[in-house]
Amino acid sequence: MGALWRYIQYGYLVVGVIFIVEGILKWNSNKEQALFMFGFAIFIILVFFFKRNFRKKIEQNNRQKK
């Protein structure tokens, strides 16, 4: 199960990149929506780093217990 979560977490980066691209494409037509996309992309990327850090701490704790 741990290996699965390693790959799933990269889905956050994929979604973040998609929102960045959407924000760039909407910049000229609707700046308010583009800024929302950029903000959401930043949030998703921060979630990726938080989850990665948390997963590494859990794995390290599990190794120490064994």
Image (tube, rainbow, N blue to C red):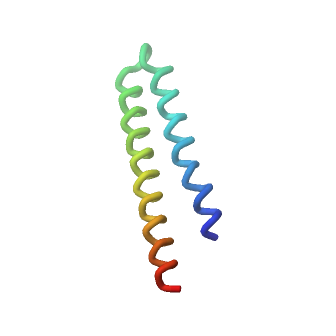
Residue 66's place in the image compared with 55, above or below, is below
Report the side of 39 relative to 10 (left or right). left
The residue that appears at 50% across and 79% down in the rendered structure is: 62
Residue 2 is situated, as x and y percent measured from the top left of the image, at 60, 68
Check the image and name the residue furthest to the bottom: 66
Number of numbered discs = 0
The residue that appears at 47% across and 22% down in the rendered structure is: 24
Residue 40's place in the image compared with 30, above or below, is below
Residue 8 is situated, as x and y percent measured from the top left of the image, at 60, 56
Residue 30 is situated, as x and y percent measured from the top left of the image, at 41, 20
The residue that appears at 50% across and 71% down in the rendered structure is: 59
- Could you tell me which quadrant the N terminus lies in? bottom right
Depth order, front residue of 15/66 = 66
Depth order, front residue of 43/49 = 49
The residue that appears at 39% across and 40% down in the rendered structure is: 42
Report the side of 14 relative to 41 (left or right). right
Residue 46 is situated, as x and y percent measured from the top left of the image, at 39, 48
Query: Which of the 4 quarters of the picture holds residue 53?
Result: bottom left
